[in-house]
Every structure is written in C-alpha cells, then in structure tokens.
Image: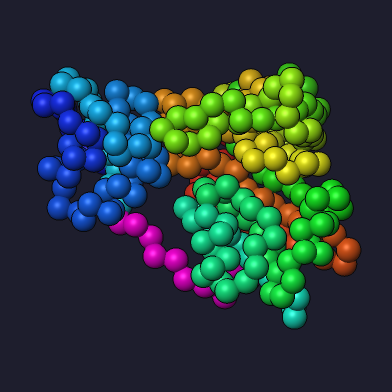
Amino acid sequence: MKKLKVTVPSRLLSFVKDSFELPTKDLRWSIEHGRCFVNGDVERFSSTRVRKGDEVVIWPAKRPVFKKEEKRVLFEDEEVLFYNKPPYITSSDLAKMLDVHLVHRLDRDTTGVILFAKNNPTPYEKLFQDRRIEKTYFTLVEGVPKKKSGYVTGKMRKIGTREGAVIWGLAQAGSWSHTDWECEESGKKYSFICCRPLSGRTHQIRVHMRSLGHPVIGDCEYGNRKAIPGLFRPLLHARELKFGSYCVTAPLPSDFRQWKEKLL
C-alpha cells in the first residue's frame, strides 16, 4: 500500500504510473479491481481526473493469470461441468478458458459454483429460465438486520450508468425479482447472510441487500464507497446449485473466510 499526494491535475492512471515500476496493464488492473482510493473513496476508473491536493492510496498488484485448476472442478460428467469460479474473471472469459458453453453468469468478482454445458447449453438455460434450479449464496453485509429472515421482491431495471458501467435498481417497471434471505450470524457491525434468489437478474442480490439497508461489504457500486481498507471486492459467494440429481456446493474462498472471522 502506498499513499500519494496529487500536485498536478492528471488522469488517475497517468498519475500513479509515475510512482511505480509496474507495467501500465498491472496498474490499470489494480485500479479497475478496487485497489485504489481517492480521498477515501474507492475509484475503479483509470480515466478519472484527480486534482491538486487529492490523496491517492493504492495497493498495486500484478494482473492474475488464469488457467484451469483441477481442484476447482466440483463435478463433471459427459454433459456438464460445475466449476468453483475464482474472483476477478468474467463468466464468459472463464467459459472460453475452459472450452465449455456458458449457461448462466456470476458477476466478475463473485466466487463459487457456476454451471457450464459441454455440448448443448439450451436445456440448462431453460432450467434457469423456468426457475427449476435452486441457488444459494453467502454474503457478508453491513449492519445487523432487525429480523432473522425475510424476502425482497419487486421489479428491477437499469437506473443509470457510471463511467459506462450499468447500475441496476428496484423500480415500478422492469423485470420481476425475488430473493429470500436468512441471517446466519451477526457481529456488532456486520452480518453473514444466506440468500436464495428465485429469479436471476443482474446484480440482484447486491441490489436487494442494498434495498434492505444492508449492502454487501466491499461493493462500491451499491454499498459504501469508503470501503474497508484491504478489501477489494464484494464478498458474495455462490454456495450451491441444486436441480434433478445434481447438488453441488463450493467452499468459501480464503479471503471471504478471513474477513468473516475478522468482522464477526
């Protein structure tokens, strides 16, 4: 981690390039993946302009190189592959890397069980569309819910953009969404939540948790932009997929476990 003070107005990437020997691609990756704060707020866009007097804090890192890891194969047969998705890679890029067909998506920084088809993805896509697949997620959120369990339902649609990134939200018009949730464990300031979405809208759990006043920690888009130092992604994990004879689970990743132990 390094603290820097802006003396001359500049683009964020141009500014940090002058302070590190890392390649530009690694510095850009570090910014885009939540490892840079400007005046205490997470800033994920390298084109953002910084002004004289701004304080920039950055945790620079080398861009990860992804490859198929056998230990991440949760189950496979002739038709399907269940994989334990790591953070920082899109679902479509992961499908290309594994040479399989994309069936559904997890957010880029979400970890856990993802299903791919080895041949025809259509039957599995239809299972998701017909809500015949049971999905379970774990997340860490801000605050302590007043109730032990509940649900969020409502229509979702695009409500705006930021630097080209689409922001979703609950609205009067849009696509139906529903998430059941249950508080598994709470500390003084944070809670460990189990979510079971019935629908599969983009950013659904993140939007729904925010609507309850308990945004996912590390989520600078729908939560607190003054994120916890050292936490660089939303702590959201796809725990289980269940349908037919399949019931596949993925263990919590190490960073999630460490933050859970530290915060609860």
Is 21 covered by the magenta stretch? Answer: no
Is residue 209 something one can see in this rendering?
A: no
Q: Is residue 105 above or below residue 8?
A: below
The residue that appears at 62% across and 38% down in the rendered structure is: 203
The residue that appears at 53% across and 50% down in the rendered structure is: 108
The residue that appears at 53% across and 40% down in the rendered structure is: 234
Closer to the camera in the image, 62 or 162: 162
Residue 65, image quadrant: bottom left
The residue that appears at 37% across and 43% down in the rendered structure is: 32
Which quadrant holds the C terminus? top right
Residue 171, image quadrant: top right
Closer to the camera in the image, 127 or 264: 127
Q: Is residue 209 above or below residue 99?
A: above
Which quadrant holds the N terminus? top left
Q: Residue furthest bottom?
A: 78
Closer to the camera in the image, 100 or 135: 100
Residues in magenta, as a range: 62-75
| Percent coordinates x, y for residue 157 in the rendering | 66, 30
| Percent coordinates x, y for residue 3 in the rendering | 21, 33
| Percent coordinates x, y for residue 226 in the rendering | 41, 25
| Percent coordinates x, y for residue 243 in the rendering | 85, 59
Is residue 63 something one can see in this rendering?
A: yes
Residue 103, image quadrant: bottom right
